[in-house]
Structures are given as C-alpha cells and as structure tokens.
Image (cartoon, helix red, strand yellow):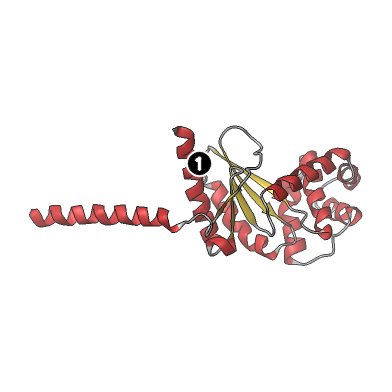
Amino acid sequence: MITIVRNAALSILAMSFVVQASAATWEEGKHYQELDNPVRTASDSGIEVAEVFWYGCPHCYTFKPLIESWVENSPEYVNYVNIPAALGKSWEPHAKAFYALQTMGELDKVHDALFEALAGERRPLNSGEALADFVADHGVDGEEFLKNYNSFGVNAKMQQAQAKIRGARVTGTPTMIVNGKYRITASMAGGHEAVLEVVDYLVEKEREGQDQ
C-alpha cells in the first residue's frame, strides 16, 4: 500500500515537472520575441493569432496543412487571421489579390489554388491581368476581380496590413503574431511544429492574463 502511494506521488511529481519544464522550454528572446510596441489586432475580444504569409513562399506552403489543422482544433476564443506580406515589390500583386478576393467573398475559391500555383508550381502570376485570368479559371469573375484589385479600398487594406507587419518587425514568412504582442518564426522556435507549440503557450499566457 505504501509502495502504491509512493509511486502515485512520484508520478504526480513527474507530471508536474514535465508541465513546468514544458512551459520553461519557451524563452522570450530565444523562442519568441515580445514586441516593444504591440500592434493593433482586428478584434478587441478573444485572442488574435495572425499568420503573415506569401503565396509564393515554399515554407508557407509546407506550413499550410499544419496551421490549418491547428486552426480547426483551436479554442473558440482564438481569432485566426491571414495577413499577406508584401516584403518585396514582386509580392505586392499577390497581397492585393488576397484582399480583392476577400472583398468579393471569393477567397475560399482560390486561396488553395494560388498557393499551389505560386509556391508549388512557380507560375509567373505577377500582374493584375495574369491573376485575373487565373482566378477566372477558378470560377471568379475576372473583370470584377480587376476592378477590386485596382480599387482604393483594396490598396488601403494592403497598406494597413503592411503597416502592421512593419510594426511587428516581420522580415520573413511564415511569421506568427500572437495578440499583437509576440512574434514567432520557425528559426526561433526550432521548426514549424514547434512554432505552433509556442503559439499555444502564448495563447494560454494571454488567456490567463485576460481572466485575471
């Protein structure tokens, strides 16, 4: 009886140690970076988890199924958002395409196809016209797409997104931003899977802060 109790106590102690060690594994400044100046989130409620991505990024392409699975299983209080990056001039058409399709309510039709074409097949879809032809092949009105692509509203959304990206000091993709306060990359965390573990840790950290 004493042996059983002792073993149970040791098991509880071991489990406690594992939990503490897991939490201690993620160090600020090493596995993630706390921003000196937090950036605005899209919503005042819940906890925002933003992925900064580029359709032509092979690393984003590899990360895509992992983040999609994570989002599918994330708590209701998590607000997941995509932020298309325009870190270079050649990226701008793809960021504008994202917001044009989002404005039209057609993003779900073409989002996966754009990843496949740009990151998977390396197709030269580098202008509004080329992108309009592409989305038309996927059931989206090409003329309406171009109208939105060139609109003031889409340009404003893209500029707002880039301001947020600059504010978070994002220099590559994919990069995760948790609640406008923390930046995580695969090179910092130690791989794509580890990125999501750090995100989980930071989401809970923020959740605990909101509950206090």
Picture residue at 36% right of the left edge, 53% below the top: 20
Q: Residue at x 67, y 61 (%)?
A: 61
Vertical side of 200 occupied by 190: above or below: below
Give the left or right position of residue 160, taking residue 182 as reference.
right
Image: 107 above or below 195: above
Which of these two is toward me, 63 or 185?
185
Numbered-mark total: 1
Q: Picture coordinates of residue 65 (x, y %)?
A: 60, 57
Q: Residue at x 47, y 49 (%)?
A: 201
Q: What residue type is labelled 1?
A: Glu
Q: Position of residue 85 (x, y in %)?
A: 74, 53
Give neighbour class at mark 1: few <14, some 14-19, many 20+ (Cα, 10 Å).
Answer: some
* In this rendering, position of residue 15 left or right of residue 58: left
Residue situated in front as seen by the camera: 90 or 133: 90
Pointer 1: what residue? 206
Residue pushed farthest left?
Answer: 1
Left or right for 70, reference 138 = left
Residue 46 position, x and y percent, is 56, 35
Label 1 element class: helix
Residue 22 as seen in the image, left or right of residue 16: right
